[in-house]
């Protein structure tokens, strides 16, 4: 068992498949499979349960994954503190809204000031990012919800959720009767097809929590489709499939160009924070500290 094998195994576990892991690591799928098989042979345990449609870690695979993440983190710390060749490595994960809104600008500016830094970017739902930061496979996360006490959360900016609908006469008629405050009657959303994100989405988690405040449960919604991708969901709203509750930043350009209609929701309940998160521990690599400082300074200056 060596560091490279553990790195491959961790990537297979997090990518939920050999093909996705091989693309991420720029290795052939057969190479990835061979290394995982070698681990299974050495340990005498099955680590991954594979079928035509499903992929999951076995109980022993889950145990090894947790140890492997810790080992890789310690390996990285040792190199940074004792060895090192002048370059630094930063692992960042982001959910869809920060990725579209501000992460590219922050990353570009930071790398111009830290030319010897290499960055590995991961895009996933908020709860996936939080889990990976907690487990140590990511240094920094940008997310749209707050759930894990083992992570440190830094509020960055408020994000407004809106009701997004196709810009058609049919939906304009349904949502024509707004209240005096200009806000939509939330009960109207029960009458039309609803497009949802999967359960690990920060936007969906916050939206369902806000709807519950008004007495609307998830099972009350007429959910006709669930999406992994916020971008695909947004495009399906534009195509006329149904409505959804999305971050305004995800649909701003489509709204301004008249391709999607938006309807206001109660601002107090449908406004959330976007966060930078990192693992709450005594040791933080200097590169992580510098990135946190740069991000906080960016938001103080720009917003």
Image (cartoon, grey):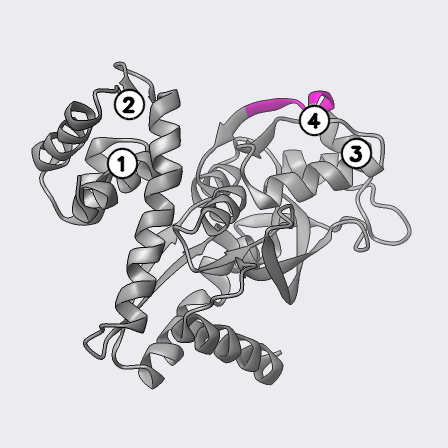
Disc 1 from disc 3: Cα separation: 37 Å
Q: Nearer the viewer, residue 2 or 163?
A: 2
Tell me: residue 94, above or below residue 88: above
Closest to the camera, between mark 1 and mark 3, is: 1
Tell me: residue 226, above or below residue 1: above
Residue identifier under label 4? 218
Residue identifier under label 2? 48
Q: Quadrant of the N terminus?
A: top left
N-terminal label among 4 and 2: 2
Extent of the magenta region: 219-224
Q: Quadrant of residue 73?
A: bottom left
The x and y percentages for residue 12 are 27, 36
Is residue 205 at all visible to an observer of this figure? Answer: yes
N-terminal label among 4 and 1: 1
The x and y percentages for residue 177 are 83, 41
Residue 112 colored in magenta in the image: no
Q: Nearer the viewer, residue 241 or 132?
A: 132
Disc 3 from disc 2: Cα separation: 38 Å
Residue identifier under label 3? 212
Q: Is residue 216 left or right of residue 246?
A: right
């Amino acid at each position: 068992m060596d560091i490279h094998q553990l790195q491959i195994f961790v990537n297979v576990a997090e990518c939920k498949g050999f093909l996705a892991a091989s693309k991420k690591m720029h290795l052939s799928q057969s190479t990835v499979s061979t290394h995982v098989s070698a681990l299974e042979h050495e340990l005498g345990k099955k680590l991954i349960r594979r079928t035509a449609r499903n992929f999951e870690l076995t109980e022993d695979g889950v145990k090894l994954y947790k140890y492997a993440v810790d080992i890789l983190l310690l390996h990285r710390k040792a190199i940074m503190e004792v060895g090192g060749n002048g370059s630094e490595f930063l692992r960042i994960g982001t959910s869809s809204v920060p990725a579209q809104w501000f992460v590219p600008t922050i990353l570009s500016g930071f790398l111009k000031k830290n030319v010897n830094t290499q960055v590995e970017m991961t895009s996933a739902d908020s709860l996936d990012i939080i889990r990976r930061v907690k487990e140590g496979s990511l240094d920094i996360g940008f997310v749209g919800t707050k759930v894990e006490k083992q992570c440190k959360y830094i509020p960055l900016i408020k994000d407004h959720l809106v009701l997004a609908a196709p810009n058609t006469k049919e939906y304009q008629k349904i949502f024509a009767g707004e209240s005096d405050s200009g806000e939509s009657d939330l009960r109207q959303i029960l009458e039309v097809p609803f497009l949802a994100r999967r359960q690990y989405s920060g936007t969906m988690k916050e939206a369902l929590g806000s709807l519950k405040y008004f007495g609307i449960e998830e099972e009350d919604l007429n959910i006709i489709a669930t999406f992994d991708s916020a971008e695909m969901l947004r495009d399906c709203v534009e195509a006329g499939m149904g409505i959804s509750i999305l971050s305004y930043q995800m649909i701003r350009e489509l709204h301004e160009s008249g391709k999607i209609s938006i309807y206001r929701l109660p601002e107090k309940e449908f406004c959330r924070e976007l966060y930078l998160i990192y693992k709450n521990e005594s040791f933080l690599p200097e590169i992580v500290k510098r990135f946190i400082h740069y991000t906080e300074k960016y938001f103080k200056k720009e917003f």
